Image (tube, helix red, strand yellow):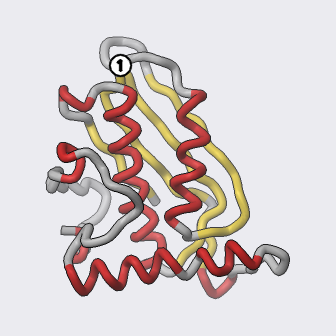
Amino acid sequence: MGHQHVLEPELRTNDGAANFARHLLTKAAERLRRGDYYCQRLGLHLSWTGDLGGWWDEVCFNETRDTGFLLGCLDQLWPRLPSYKPLSVGVVLLDLVPASQHQPDLFDAVNQRRQKLSPMIDRINDRYGRRAIGFGLLPPDVRAFKGHAAFHRVPESWEF
């Protein structure tokens, strides 16, 4: 489960790609929770301008659907990124586990409390509008993005 985006020319920097990846991950994590899943891996992929190809890396963890935790995992991947000019960025949540089969970690009470924060943010955004509250402030050009072009699925009404 994931999202990808071809960056506008003004966002084709490492900072622009990082900010847009955070936006995409926030959307993917919300879809994960709405689908009633947990994930065990986060993948990040970028393609470069010119004929430089692309890059992929991932991080593994215990089952989660906490956006804050996933954003921290994304931050772990950025230092590994080559310094080419990015053309597109994508995030993927992998190794999905249905909530009915989720095994909570008995020794991680902090994470169990944090797991409640993201669904609460989802409910606030449902009530007061998309992006009424979130995990940090994204730059204006990322916040202003409203485009949707779903090629593999029909977007849900809450995604607009």
Structural crowding at the residue carrying mark 1, measured as other residues with C-alpha within 10 Å and reported as few (<14), some (14–19) or many (≥20): some
Give the side of residue 22 with respect to residue 61, left or right: left
Give the side of residue 107 with respect to residue 155, left or right: right
Question: Residue 89: x, y in percent?
Answer: 37, 38
Secondary structure found at label 1: loop
Against 38, is 82 above or below? Answer: above
The image quarter in which residue 77 lies: top right
Give the side of residue 11 with respect to residue 34, left or right: left
Question: Residue 140: x, y in percent?
Answer: 19, 47
Q: Residue at x 31, y 13 (%)?
A: 50
Question: Residue 101: x, y in percent?
Answer: 69, 83
Count of numbered badges drawn on the protein: 1
The kind of residue tagged 1 is Lys
Q: Residue at x 46, y 80 (%)?
A: 119
Which residue matches tag 1?
85
Q: Residue at x 19, y 33 (%)?
A: 8
Specify the farthest residue to the front. Answer: 137
The image quarter in which residue 152 lies: bottom left
Specify the farthest residue to the top. Answer: 51
